[in-house]
Image (tube, rainbow, N blue to C red):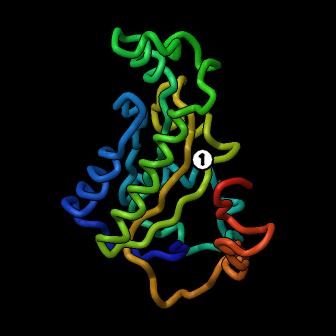
Amino acid sequence: MTRSFLVDPVPAEKLDRVLDSARRVPSAGNTQGFDFVVLEGFETSVYWDVTLPPERREKFRWQGLLRAPVLVTIWADAGAYLKRYGQEDKAHSGLGNDVGAWATPYWIVDSSFAAMAMQLAAIDEGLGVLFFGMFDHSSELAEALGVPGDRMPIGTIAMGWPDDADKTMGRSASMERRPLEDGTESVVHRGQW
């Protein structure tokens, strides 16, 4: 994860390849129930003005993050899944009637897959990325960006050229990874828990 960026812009063709990779992720019923609002250059100030007011900005630990030349906000569309699963080929599932019918909310899953694919594509293009939440600013941000009121915030991806001069690590970076298959704390459970 990159927390410090250079101000240099990301070339349009490079950014378009990254966004195109993200939009091509598999989704339930090929619903594609996610949208990206892309802010570049001076447009990013709208994001920071809403989420990090000037009085807090001066003391913000990650000043290099504020230089990211691209911010992509990701929004999930639950209504798209109701519409898709209400169509003839999916209606038998009963998932087109109510979001409560979904044991797993695939609008969140698919939007998260798109966010991950976007980050991996950006890294393949030599860019740095950082995913972070909108948290309690999401409603105000949606309004500032003109996002329809029925969309759910997933998060924000800062993207750009890493500032290699700033190697400051986050506090969580020193935490050890859970073991693959060693003991009760392992990630993998083969055959049963």
Label 1 crowd bin: few (<14), some (14–19), many (20+), radius 10 Å = some
- Tell whether 31 sits left or right of 191: left
Which residue is denoted by mark 1 in the rendering?
A: 50
State the residue in front, 72 or 61. 72
Q: Is residue 139 above or below residue 154?
A: above
Residue 177 placement (x, y as % from top left): 68, 75
- Tell whether 57 sits left or right of 13: right
Q: Residue lying farthest front?
A: 191
In the rendered structure, which amino acid carries the disc numbered 1?
Val
Residue at 50 percent of width and 33 percent of height: 107
Residue 140 placement (x, y as % from top left): 61, 37
Residue 75 placement (x, y as % from top left): 49, 38
Figure quadrant of the C terminus: bottom right
Residue at 52 percent of width and 29 percent of height: 151
Residue at 49 percent of width and 13 percent of height: 96
Q: Is residue 125 above or below residue 42?
A: below
Residue at 64 percent of width and 19 percent of height: 100
Q: Residue lying farthest bottom?
A: 165
Element on which disc 1 rests:
helix
State the residue in front, 34 or 143. 34
Q: Is residue 156 above or below residue 85?
A: below
State the residue in front, 133 or 143. 133
Q: Residue lying farthest right?
A: 184
Residue 108 placement (x, y as % from top left): 54, 38
Q: Is residue 162 above or below residue 79?
A: below
